[in-house]
Image (cartoon, grey):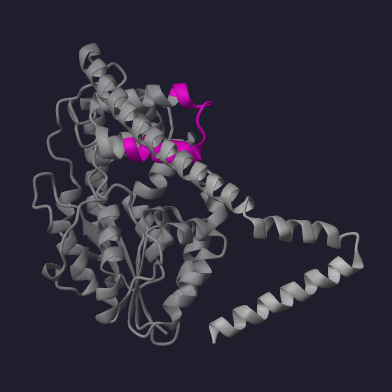
C-alpha cells in the first residue's frame, strides 16, 4: 500500500492545469524520488475523475469506464507517496468522496486532501469564460444573475458552487480526515511571482520546487472581453453545424488557446461593482469560517479576499471596433489553419495516388498474372487447386530457409 496518498481535488481555474502538466512532464523524475503520478496520457486523471463522478462530458466519458479503479489500483500497489489530481473532483458528493478515499486507503496509508482556491472576483469571470470555451452561449449578465440566485436552480450555478464554494468542498472531502491532513493552498494575488503557486503546492508534497523547470505551455490563458464575446457569438452559429470532436481541436485548441488568448487585444474580464461587493462579503464569511476549522493553510487566507477590481467592461456589449478587430484575427487564424489542413490533405492524396500506382504496376507483372490465373482456375479444377497448394508450400519453405 502507498504510505501517503495526496488527493488534489481542485478547484477549477486555480492553476490546476499548470500543476498537472508539471506533474505529468516530471512523472519519471518524481518516481525516482518515490512519488507516483500514474498517467500514461496527460488526461488520465481527468478520465478517472469522470468515471468516479459518473459525469457526461460530450462523449468522452465512454473512454473513462473503469479508469478510477485502474488508477486506484496503481496507487494501492505503490510503496511511497502517490498523487491524484483533477479539479472536477471538487464537485464529488459525500458518497463519491467515501468511495474515492476507501479505494486508495489501507493499513498504514495516510490520505491527504489538497484544495487550491482563488478569490471569487477572479473566479467568477474565469468560470464564465471556461463555460464559453465549452460551447456555452449564456450571456455574462445571465450567468451573474444565476450565480447570485439563492436557490441555485440553474445548472451553471449548481456546477459553480459545487466546485468553488471552498468551505463546502473542504467539508465534503475532509470531514473524515484529521484537520492537519486537509490542506488549503491559496492562489497568490495578481502580480505575485509566477512560480509561487508551484512552491506552495510542492511544499505540501514535500518537494524542493526549485528542482523542477517550470513550463507554462498548458496554462489556461485568459480571453479578453471582445475575444470572449466573439467566441460566444461563434458558439451560437456553430451549435448545429460542428460536432464536438471537431470543435475541440479547431475552436478551443487552435482558435482560443493558440491564438485569441495569446494575442488578446481587449481588457480582461472583470465583474461589475455590485457583484464585487457581494463577492467580497461572501469571501469574508468564508475566511472567518475557514480560520475556525483549523485546516493546514498553505499561503494566506487573506488571498481569498478580492483585491480592487479591474474596470468593468461588459462582454455582452463590447465596443464594435474592438469586436471587429478580434473577429478579423479569428478569421485569419482559422484561414491559416484551413490552409494548413488543405496542404496536409493534398499531401495525403498524393501519397495515396502513388500507392495506387505502385499497386497497379505490381498487378501488371507476369508472375502476378500467372498467380491470379492459377487462383481463379483452382476454384473449378482439382488439379489446379493441388498445384496452388504445392506452390504455397514451396513458397513457405523458401521463406523459412531465408529466415534461418
Residue found 13% across the figure and 71% down from its top: 211
Q: Does 160 appear above or below 342? A: below
Instruction: Give the percent coordinates (x, y) of residue 115.
Output: 30, 59
Q: Which residues are magenta?
A: 236-254
What is the magenta segment's predominant secondary structure? helix
Tell whether position 196 is magenta: no
Instruction: Give the percent coordinates (x, y) of residue 151.
Output: 46, 35
> In the image, 306: left or right of 181?
left
The C terminus is located in which quarter?
bottom right
Q: Nearer the viewer, residue 389 or 38?
A: 389
Q: Does 190 appear above or below 261? A: below
Q: Nearer the viewer, residue 330 or 207?
A: 330
Instruction: Give the percent coordinates (x, y) of residue 282.
Output: 27, 41
Residue 376, picture quadrant: bottom right
Residue found 12% across the figure and 58% down from its top: 196
Q: Nearer the viewer, residue 170 or 187?
A: 187
> In the image, 33: left or right of 130?
left
The N terminus is located in which quarter?
bottom left
Residue 380, picture quadrant: bottom right
Residue 147, picture quadrant: top left
Tell whether position 238 is magenta: yes
Residue found 38% across the figure and 49% down from its top: 163
Evaluate whether residue 68 shows in this view.
yes
Q: Does 43 appear above or below 38? A: above
Q: Nearer the viewer, residue 238 or 115?
A: 238
Amino acid at each position: 500500500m502507498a504510505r501517503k496518498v495526496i488527493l488534489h481535488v481542485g478547484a477549477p481555474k486555480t492553476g490546476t492545469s499548470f500543476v498537472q502538466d508539471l506533474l505529468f512532464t516530471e512523472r519519471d523524475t518524481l518516481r525516482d524520488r518515490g512519488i507516483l503520478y500514474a498517467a500514461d496520457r496527460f488526461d488520465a486523471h481527468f478520465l478517472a475523475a469522470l468515471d468516479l463522478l459518473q459525469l457526461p462530458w460530450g462523449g468522452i466519458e465512454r473512454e473513462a469506464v473503469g479508469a478510477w479503479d485502474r488508477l486506484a489500483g496503481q496507487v494501492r500497489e505503490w510503496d511511497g507517496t502517490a498523487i491524484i489530481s483533477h479539479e472536477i473532483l471538487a464537485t464529488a458528493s459525500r458518497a463519491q468522496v467515501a468511495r474515492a478515499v476507501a479505494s486508495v486507503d489501507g493499513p498504514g496509508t495516510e490520505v491527504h486532501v489538497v484544495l487550491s482556491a482563488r478569490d471569487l472576483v477572479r473566479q467568477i469571470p474565469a468560470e464564465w469564460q471556461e463555460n464559453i470555451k465549452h460551447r456555452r452561449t449564456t450571456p455574462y449578465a445571465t450567468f451573474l444573475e444565476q450565480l447570485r440566485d439563492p436557490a441555485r436552480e440553474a445548472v451553471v450555478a449548481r456546477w459553480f458552487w459545487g466546485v468553488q464554494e471552498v468551505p463546502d468542498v473542504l467539508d465534503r472531502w475532509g470531514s473524515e480526515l484529521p484537520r492537519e491532513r486537509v490542506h488549503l493552498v491559496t492562489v497568490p494575488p495578481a502580480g505575485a511571482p509566477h512560480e509561487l503557486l508551484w512552491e506552495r503546492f510542492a511544499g505540501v508534497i514535500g518537494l524542493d520546487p526549485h528542482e523542477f523547470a517550470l513550463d507554462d505551455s498548458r496554462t489556461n490563458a485568459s480571453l479578453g472581453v471582445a475575444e470572449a464575446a466573439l467566441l460566444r457569438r461563434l458558439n451560437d452559429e456553430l451549435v448545429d453545424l460542428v460536432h464536438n470532436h471537431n470543435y475541440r481541436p479547431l475552436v478551443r485548441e487552435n482558435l482560443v488557446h493558440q491564438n485569441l488568448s495569446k494575442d488578446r487585444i481587449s481588457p480582461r474580464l472583470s465583474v461589475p461593482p455590485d457583484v464585487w461587493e457581494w463577492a467580497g462579503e461572501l469571501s469574508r464569511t468564508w475566511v472567518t469560517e475557514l480560520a475556525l476549522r483549523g485546516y493546514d493553510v498553505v499561503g494566506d487566507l487573506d488571498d481569498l479576499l478580492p483585491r480592487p477590481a479591474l474596470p468593468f467592461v461588459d462582454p455582452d456589449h463590447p465596443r464594435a471596433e474592438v469586436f471587429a478587430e478580434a473577429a478579423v484575427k479569428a478569421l485569419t487564424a482559422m484561414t491559416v489553419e484551413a490552409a494548413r489542413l488543405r496542404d496536409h490533405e493534398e499531401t495525403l492524396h498524393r501519397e495515396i495516388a502513388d500507392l495506387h500506382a505502385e499497386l497497379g504496376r505490381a498487378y501488371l507483372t507476369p508472375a502476378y498474372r500467372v498467380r491470379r490465373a492459377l487462383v481463379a482456375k483452382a476454384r473449378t479444377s482439382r488439379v489446379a487447386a493441388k498445384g496452388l497448394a504445392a506452390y504455397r508450400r514451396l513458397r513457405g519453405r523458401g521463406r523459412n530457409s531465408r529466415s534461418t
